């Protein structure tokens, strides 16, 4: 009986310690994301992050080693999920005989994926947009670059598939991918400032405007 009580006591100690660590880690991630989104990555300091999270600097260093480490973890959690969504939504099924069943629905799914993710994860998405023009030599740029490349590769591959059916787009796949994402992100930026909505109707307008440019 004494042994059982002792083992139970040890289990509860370990369980509570692990729960506390898990809560501290998630709290740090949430607070860092909030500050990075509100103030920008460079302006948000470690002192502010730990103060908002209610933990000590050693706790942050234990989980993430540095500010760059916590930023990298945020990217991993949010960006990997987003790129999986994009990969699923960007599959092109050719039907050149019907406008509504060909390129249009594919690009519409992609635009809606961007809009939905921006609305559901606004702090993260605004942080990403704010870093779009960070200096190429900045450490933060090096951390985010693989995720950006992975995202554009998904969209480029989609336009490569489209170009197999619509030969006028051959050789323009890269330009199409960049310009389409730029239009979508510009709309999200305007939405964040309250100028437009990002709903299905807006997604249709963006796609129609883009397609008018590439097929006119």
Image: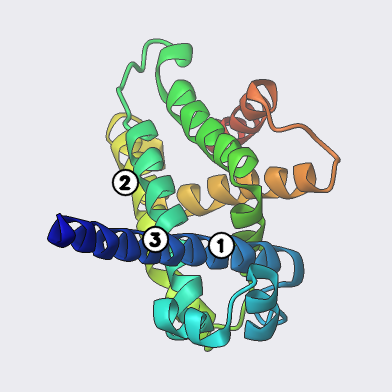
Q: Position of residue 72 (x, y in %)?
A: 44, 72
Which residue bears the numbered disc 1? 27
In this rendering, does residue 149 appear at all?
Answer: no
The residue mark sitting in front, 2 or 3, is 3
Residue at image location 69% in from the left, 77% down from the top: 51
* Front in this rendered view, residue 103 or 124: 124
Q: Position of residue 150 (x, y in %)?
A: 35, 58
Residue at image location 45% in from the left, 64% down from the top: 20
Q: Are marks 2 and 3 in contact (CB under 8 Å)?
A: no
**Classed neighbour count for the residue bearing mark 3: other residues with Cα under 10 Å, few (<14), some (14–19), many (≥20):** few
Residue 157, labelled with which disc? 2
Q: Taking 139 as reference, is 174 left or right?
A: left
For the residues marked 3 and 1, what is the alpha-carbon distance in whole angstroms?
16 Å
Q: Secondary structure at mark 2?
A: helix
Q: Image quadrant for the C terminus?
A: top right
Which numbered disc, 3 or 1, marks the residue that appears first in the sequence?
A: 3
* Front in this rendered view, residue 72 or 167: 72
For the residues marked 1 and 2, what is the alpha-carbon distance in whole angstroms?
37 Å
**Classed neighbour count for the residue bearing mark 2: other residues with Cα under 10 Å, few (<14), some (14–19), many (≥20):** some
* In the depicted structure, whether residue 178 falls above or below residue 56: above
Q: Image quadrant for the N terminus?
A: bottom left
Q: Are marks 3 and 1 in contact (CB under 8 Å)?
A: no
Which numbered disc, 2 or 3, marks the residue that appears first in the sequence?
A: 3
Which residue bears the numbered disc 3? 16
Q: Secondary structure at mark 1?
A: helix
Q: How many marks?
A: 3
* In the depicted structure, whether residue 103 falls above or below residue 65: above
Which numbered disc, 1 or 2, marks the residue that appears first in the sequence?
A: 1
Q: Position of residue 74 (x, y in %)?
A: 48, 63
* Front in this rendered view, residue 194 or 49: 49
The residue mark sitting in front, 1 or 2, is 1
């Amino acid at each position: 009986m004494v042994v059982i009580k002792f083992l139970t006591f040890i289990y509860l100690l370990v369980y509570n310690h692990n729960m506390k660590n898990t809560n501290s880690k998630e709290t740090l991630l949430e607070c860092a994301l909030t500050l990075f989104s509100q103030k920008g990555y460079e302006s948000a300091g470690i002192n502010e992050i730990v103060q908002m999270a209610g933990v000590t600097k050693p706790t942050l260093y234990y989980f993430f080693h540095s500010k760059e480490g916590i930023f990298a973890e945020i990217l991993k959690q949010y960006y990997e999920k987003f790129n999986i969504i994009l990969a699923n939504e960007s599959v092109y099924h050719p039907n050149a005989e019907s406008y509504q069943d060909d390129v249009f629905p594919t690009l519409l799914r992609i635009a809606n994926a961007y809009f939905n993710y921006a609305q559901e994860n606004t702090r993260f998405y605004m942080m990403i947009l704010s870093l779009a023009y960070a200096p190429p030599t900045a450490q933060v740029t090096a951390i985010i670059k693989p995720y950006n490349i992975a995202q554009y590769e998904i969209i480029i591959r989609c336009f490569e598939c489209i170009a197999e059916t619509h030969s006028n787009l051959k050789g323009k796949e890269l330009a199409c991918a960049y310009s389409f994402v730029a239009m979508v992100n510009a709309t999200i930026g305007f939405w964040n400032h309250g100028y437009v909505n990002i709903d299905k109707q807006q997604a249709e307008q963006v796609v129609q405007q883009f397609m008018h440019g590439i097929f006119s």
